[in-house]
Amino acid sequence: MKNKLMTALLSLFTILTAQAQAEVEMADTMRSEGKIYVVVGIILIVLVGLIVYLVLMDRKVSRLEKQLSDRQR
């Protein structure tokens, strides 16, 4: 069972990798016009925003957990 699942996942990964390496006209156009950097920049901004949000949320949760444990003592 485990071998069949692993084989299926590896074959799916191989197919996806082969398709990703095919030439994409839109990507070539965006790269030649310089728009690809805008797309990459927006993706980076969104990822950085998510990471900052998660770090701040973790701090708040940690602070609340500490307050809760202090009250229970």
Image (tube, grey):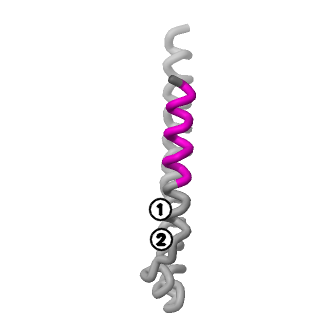
Helix or strand or loop: what does disc 1 sit on?
helix
Name the residue type under label 2.
Ile
Question: How would you rate the neighbour count of disc 1 (Cα within 10 Å): few for under 14, some for 14-19, many for 20 or more?
Answer: few
Which residue shows up at 49% across the image and 64% down it?
19
* Quadrant where the image shows the C terminus: top right
Residue displayed at 55% across by 53% down: 14
Q: Which residue is mark 1?
A: 46
The answer to whether residue 62 is magenta is no
| Figure check: 10 above or below 47 | above
6 drawn magenta = yes
> Which label belongs to residue 19?
none
Q: Residue at x 50, y 37 (%)?
A: 60
**Above or below, comparing residue 27 to residue 19 in the picture:** below
* Magenta region, main secondary structure: helix
Q: Residue furthest bottom?
A: 33
**Three-letter residue code for mark 1:** Val
Q: Which residues are magenta?
A: 2-14
The quarter of the displayed image where residue 18 is located:
bottom right
Which residue corresponds to mark 2?
42
